[in-house]
Structures are given as C-alpha cells and as structure tokens.
Image (cartoon, rainbow, N blue to C red):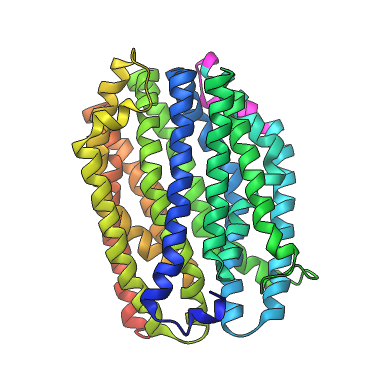
Amino acid sequence: MNEVQFATLPTRKIFFRCALPGLLAMVVSSIYMMIDGIFVGRYIGSHALAAVNLAFPVIMILFAVGDMVAVGSSVKIALLLGQGKNKEANGLFSAAFCMILGIGVLFSLVGFLAAPRLITLLIKDTTLAEVAWDYTRIFLYFMPAIMPLFAVDNYLRICGKANFSMWMNISVAVLNIILDWFFLAYLRLDIRFAALATSVSMTLGVLIALTPIVLRKLTLRFTHPRISLSTTLGIFHNGSSEFFNNISGSFMSTVVNAFLLHLGGGTAVAAYGIVMYLDSLLLMALYGILDSLQPPVSYNIGAGNHQKAREFFRLSCKVTATISLVCLLAMVCFPKELASLFLQDNSEEVLEMTVTALRLYAPAYLFLWLNMVISSFLTAMDRARDSLTIMLFRALIFPALSLAVFPQILGVTGIFITPAISGALTVIISTTIWRRLGKQQPQEA
C-alpha cells in the first residue's frame, strides 16, 4: 500500500492494513521489553530490576526531544503529502532527520555530564544508584545511533510501508531477546549487557528502516533540507503533546519511585517495575494502533476527506476498548501467574506485593483507551494544544494531585490506585474537548 491509497481504499481495509502491523510490531516490542525484565529479574536479581525501573525515566527524558521532532514532523509531512506537495514533504523530512541526529549527539554529551548527578540525586541507595548508572551509560554511548528509531518508523508508515515497519520492529525484538539470553542467561554478565543488548538491537532497527529510504524506493527520500523557522516551531508545537507526555510520565515515574522507596522500600519499587513491564504491553499495543493511524488520518484531513477521519475514530474506539478490557481481565484474574514470570523462587515478598499492585492498577484500563484515542486524533488533526491539554491532565496534573492525597491516607495502596483515579478524571476533560470541537467544526470531529 502507498500513501495515495489512504484516500481511496475503504476505511476498514486501511485500518487493518495500517493498525495490525503497527499493533503486532509494538506488542512484539513490548514483549521483548518484558523478556528483558524477566532476564534481569531472574538472572541478576530483584535489586537490578528495581535499578532499571529507577533509571528508565532518565533514559526516557533523553529520548523525549527526539520523539517530539519525530511526531511533530510526521504529522506535517503527512499533511503535505495529502495536499500533493511532495517536494516540500521531502525537504521537511530531510531537515527533521538531521535535527534528530543532532539531538542524539548533543544529548549523548550532555547525558554523560548530567546523568550521574541526576541519578545520585534521585536514588539515595548507593548500590541501586551505581547499578542504575551502569545501565544508563550504555544507552548514552549509542544515543546518536538509536535516537532516530522512532522517527524512521513513523516515516515508513507515512509511505504506507506498515508491513516493512512491522518486520523491522520484530527484527529488533528477536535480536534483543537472543542477546539478552546470550549475555545474561548463558554468560551470566551484569546489567550493562542488558542495556547493550537493547542498544545494539535498536541500532540494527535504524539501519533496516533507512535502507529503502537511502535506496530511494519510497516517496520520502533524502534531499536538500528545507525548513523555515515557522515550520520548525510548528513541529515542536505539534510534537509537544508527545514530548510532555514523555517528560511528565518520566517525572511522575520518578516521583512514584520516591514514594515507593519511602513507603515500601526496594520491594515496592521492584513490584511497581513488574507492573510497568506488563502495563507497557497494553500501552505499546494502543500506541501501535494509534500511531499507525496518524498518517492516514492526517493525509485524509489534508485532502479534505473528513468523513473517512471520523470513521477511523469510531473504529479505533471499538478496537482499543476491546484490547483494554482483555488486559484488565488478565491482570485481575491471573496476577500471580503474571508476576511469577519476573521473579526468582525466593522473592515471595515481592510476589505478594506485585499481585496486590496489579489488581489495584488494572481499573485504569477502563479509561486509558479513550484518553489515548482522543489525544492521538487531535494530534493527527494538527490540534496540538488540545492534545497537550489532555496529556497534561492525564500524565501530570491529576496523578500529582492523587499522589499528594491518597498515599497519605492509604500508604502504598494509594500509589497503586492513582492511575485509575487520574484516568477517570481525565476522561471528563478529553470528552469535553472532543464534544466542543465537534460543535465548533463538525466537519472534522
């Protein structure tokens, strides 16, 4: 399928041609992240699992700016292609890719200067801090090579190459699992090699994704970078929702970890880490679907075909709600079986806390899907301010307010119910924005 077919094929066919590869790719990526956690927990120990969970927000902060450029430029490029402006789209694509490479180099250098101090500031346990830094610094070495991964994945989907994107992501996942097994299970090496396995695999993904672009087999191809100041600001503006989602999510993860360390120690942090590994399975599935649909939605809006965009919205709601319900039931009905995957036989205390945490966390999935669908479609419609508003309430404002109240009353339990409370409150905000948009511009919403 090519990008022109975004406007000509039936909506359901486009949906499944785009969403299924995106879903499979992201689920496989999530599974390899889970398997990474399983290898770390089983072959290094729960202390290493806790350290990875503490370090990961710092790593995500480093990726956030590059991801902002990737998302912001992807929407603009898809809109230009929908308007038939291929030359402008290629100039913008080339400029955005150069920006992302530059960000990778800059953040690698800044990371080595700032990350050790930041980790020490965030993690008071010296042993955990040392393990977290060992994990983080490997990513910093590879940052220029792996920063473009999410961007080139988006660019492939813009060109209608969802299947190629899927196989690229699967290749990354398979290599990561093989290297994890070799380094951690076979050679019994330390946490640095878990990070090395991921970094090498992501580098391979970038090389695979760039191959058809470099060989000029796609609509998007490298040319003289063409970008104005207003377009640059537009990229940052439209990608701001994704950026603040990453930043606020990382910030809140850091705050949650601090609360958990204070109220429950390393056991609580390890339990929360397992919940986050499992949570990533649903998040990545929903992101895979919604990110894959942004190019056809933006393309059709650029082409003035708003009815097809509305059809995409309704179908997205049905599919994401179903997936979320299945995940909720799995976490409520089989928490012990899920938690046991990550733990050694002598980790009974962590197991008990994880079972409780999973059951308290699961109701968040009743609300997550709708907030994500609305926010994603607003981004695809080039309405970054509304998308950013939803994200800020979902990922920062309501979680912060919940953490300020419920842990004081309920202890660790209050931390684990925060996502459900925040999600329920955010649904009120997101549906209000969507209905208001429908009244103002009924042809779009």
Q: Judge by depth and name the residue closer to the eye, 56 or 151.
A: 151
Magenta stretch, overall SS: helix
Q: In the picture shown, does residue 249 fall above or below 307?
A: above
Is residue 304 found left or right of 69 in the rendered image?
Answer: left
- Residue 119 visible? The answer is no
Q: Is residue 186 shown in magenta? A: no
How many numbered dots are placed on residues in this image? 0
- Residue 11 visible? The answer is yes
Q: Residue furthest top?
A: 346
Residue 183 quadrant: top right
* Residue displayed at 44% across by 23% down: 41
Q: Position of residue 346 (x, y in %)?
A: 34, 12
Is residue 93 found left or right of 262 in the rendered image?
Answer: right
Q: Position of residue 371 (x, y in %)?
A: 33, 59
Q: Residue furthest left?
A: 333
* Residue displayed at 58% across by 39% down: 175
Q: Which residues are magenta?
A: 114-127
Q: Position of residue 336 (x, y in %)?
A: 25, 28
Residue 216 quadrant: bottom right
